[in-house]
Amino acid sequence: MMMRMNNKLPAYDPAKIEKKWQKKWAASKLYRSEETAGKKKAYILDMFPYPSGEGLHVGHPKGYIATDIVSRMRRMQGLNVLHPMGFDAFGLPAENYALKMKTNPMIGVAKNVERFKEQLEILGFDYDWSREINTTDPEYYKWTQWIFLRLFKKGLAYESYEPINWCPSCKTGLANEDVEGSRCERCGTPVEKKPMRQWVLKITDYADKLLRDLDAKGPDSKPLIEWPESIKELQRNWIGRSEGALLTFKVKGGGRAIDVFTTRPDTLFGVTYMVVAPEHKLVKELLPSVENKKEVESYIAKAAIATEIERTDMTKDKTGVELRGVKAVNPANNEEVPVWIADYVLADYGTGAVMAVPAHDDRDYAFAKKFGLAIREVIAGGDINKTAYIEDGRLVNSGKFDGKDSQAVMKEITGFAHGKWVTKYKLRDWVFSRQRYWGEPIPIIHCEKCGAVPVPEEDLPVKLPKVKYYEPTGTGESPLAAIDKWVNVKCPKCGGKGKRETNTMPQWAGSSWYYLRYEDPKNDKALVDLEKEKYWSPVDLYVGGAEHATRHLIYARFWHKFLYDIGAVSTIEPFTRLQSVGLIMGEDGRKMSKRFGNIVNPDDIVKTYGADTMRLYEMFMGPFDQQISWNTSSMVGARRFIERVWKLREKAAEVGASDRIIHKTVKKVTEDIENLRFNTAISALMIALNELDKGKSIARKDFESYLKLLAPFAPHVAEELWISLGNKKSIHVSEWPKFDPAMVKDSNASIVVQINGRVRGSFESERGKGKEWLENTAKTLPEAKKWLEGKKIKRIVVVPDKLVNVVTES
Ligand code: ANZ
Ligand code: ZN
């Protein structure tokens, strides 16, 4: 007779147990992380939220639940876990919300952070809140400013007056990364090009490293970056490396020249005209001597208001104007060709000018056809009367290069034309100043005598002053410019009259290094202590939205590499493994948004079903990285599953043999969590529950193992049941169950039966059956008997658990 555990539990009621455990875990500091020499670490990180006033909807925590599961398992596996959380509270989203609500962002943000924390707390996450950071805390942004100063001192932060993207609605300049389809990523307003003074970070100095290290390997020859290939590819394209030739075409008369960047110098003899971007500074210089000045000027004005998308759209009708009277000279054959301006050539890529080869480039072909320009074939193989031939091939009409292969001749022609072989990137330097209030002040003082002078490091942080009026001015100055008392200071260098820089940093500044601060959040001597940094870095698993592929993830890699170069960190890449979260859409299949009225609030779901149910539901919805629609009515499935586990507790008996299913489930759930396959892990737990529930009782040890597997997913109910079994310490610091490899093998083997090497049948047998038994079973198998009738057996080959081959005499 099995002994039942005698204490019966009341009905499952999450409201009774969840709050209780959250308080106990917090009081006992269960999730505090300390660096412990010699103990293996796991740094598991979420992309931290910006605390908007709208609070969290059920889609936001999906990634947080995932990292919570992984970090809980890692802790139970004996690793030293760092799983922190904080707030990215500077920037446009927080400020625009504050403007809408007419509350000062300084007050509004603090309120929102409170609300976010409450919402996170009710879901039972294992964050170490003692390491919480907030990018708007002066003790934090002191170090953001410090990084800026170091960049400045290395010549990687500079002032520029180039035209930049300007959002007329947000009234601020934007970086290329903040523009989506020629619109402001924040508010959707089409951006304009506006020349203005701005601070720019020289991210292009790191273009090569940013690209190369996507595929770098560590000393153990493991990749430094284990990211989804799709995200790596987005970064590669954003960086956009091209190799090609820099060639110079002299302008006839006047001593000027047009430089072009081309990836196809092999087509140099096919150049029939040149095109310069309308904004190119050469156009202004040539203007006095062009014959059709009026026409050219009006075209330049029109191009200035067209968006980049419109300009480079292949399907759009090409426009352009010839600079009449201007001729350029082809360096290969001294031929004179006309020069045009056209908006399909971008001012800020390459040199802002192209040599046009209509026979072998689609855009040039369309342009030449429209304006009746000459088309000269220089690569054989196509039919240039119909279309441009863009493939490689044998050269024709190319002087002494005729007959040569186009690929082989690239560098030779470059040299022949006195050109240079160069590498170009699409990546642009990072426009780093915003004409807005709510950001880190840029720690620079402008002095009439000394120019831009860095604020001495010991004077950091330069605190953002409290202001009455924080609305953007639209003048190209931030609202800070109106605060005379703050602006007017002494020059730190000469003591003369100085003015503070009044532009602020972009939203992406604070998030470019925050993961380092969690490693040592209270340090006032350094942004992170090197010993601590060495212990925790790099981040082992980073989970967040794929939309950050070309913005946050490039900026953070850039700053990290810079910090590595100045000896402030020890690794060359910040994030080893990256996983993107598939969005949770509204029940109507649209993006969850106030606008569509399809927001589901996690507080309501937790109130009705409990946090454990919501956690299980979100992880069971589908593969983690896939987008999926919310469905509140499916919540009952997850809730019922928990209730069945709750009931199974009554069957737990002190003694009993270990069930095979437990070993199998341990293996499956462990591997699935490691690979972030949460939905199949939960389904394995459900299958196991069905099996375990079939019997009259379940061994206590088995039930405890089962609870441990459930604990990362449903931490409250697992804890409650675990403690109810008489355990004293929390299940979340108990040992993760191991499995016996012998017990996870399928108990049955499928044995193939061959007669003279040909498969004639098969049968199931228990594993480990003896040779004789297998031979006899094979011989008496009906399908085999048929072939053996009247034959004499020569020998029988047996491969245990796999195969029996009967060889007969012929
Ligand atoms: C002559 C040529 C002949 C070209 C040919 C292509 C094919 P990626 O790979 O993107 O670097 N180009 C250069 N600067 C440009 C600009 N500012 N705006 C628009 N187009 C520009 O492409 C480099 C090619 O894009 C260059 O090579 C140039 O056209 C064009 F059969 O030069 B090519
Ligand atoms: Zn905007």
Image (spheres, rainbow, N blue to C red):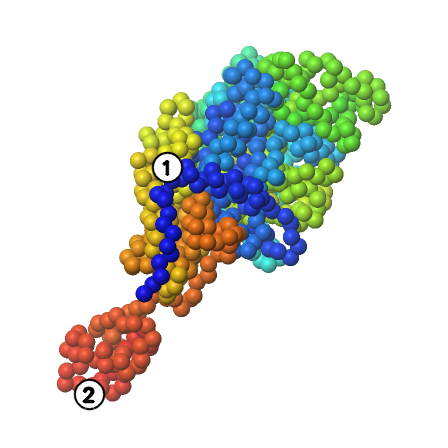
Residue labelled 2 has its Cβ within 8 Å of some atom of ligand 1: no
x, y percentage for residue 653? 37, 59
Distance of label 2 from label 1 (alpha carbons): 71 Å
Local crowd at mark 1 within 10 Å, few (<14), some, or many (≥20)? some
Say whether marks 2 and 1 touch (CB < 8 Å).
no
Quarter occupied by the C terminus: bottom left
Q: Residue placed farthest to the right in the image? A: 494
**Secondary structure under badge 2?**
loop
The amino acid marked with disc number 2 is Lys
Q: Which mark is residue 792?
A: 2
- Left or right position of 755 against 246: left
Q: Which mark is residue 609?
A: 1
Q: Residue 266, located in which quarter of the rendered image?
A: top right
Q: Which mark is residue 710?
A: none
- Left or right position of 544 against 756: right
The amino acid marked with disc number 1 is Tyr
* Residue for point 40% across, 30% down: 604
- Left or right position of 100 against 797: right
Q: Is residue 331 visible?
A: no
Local crowd at mark 2 within 10 Å, few (<14), some, or many (≥20)? few
Of callouts 2 and 1, which one flags the residue occurring earlier in the amino acid sequence?
Answer: 1
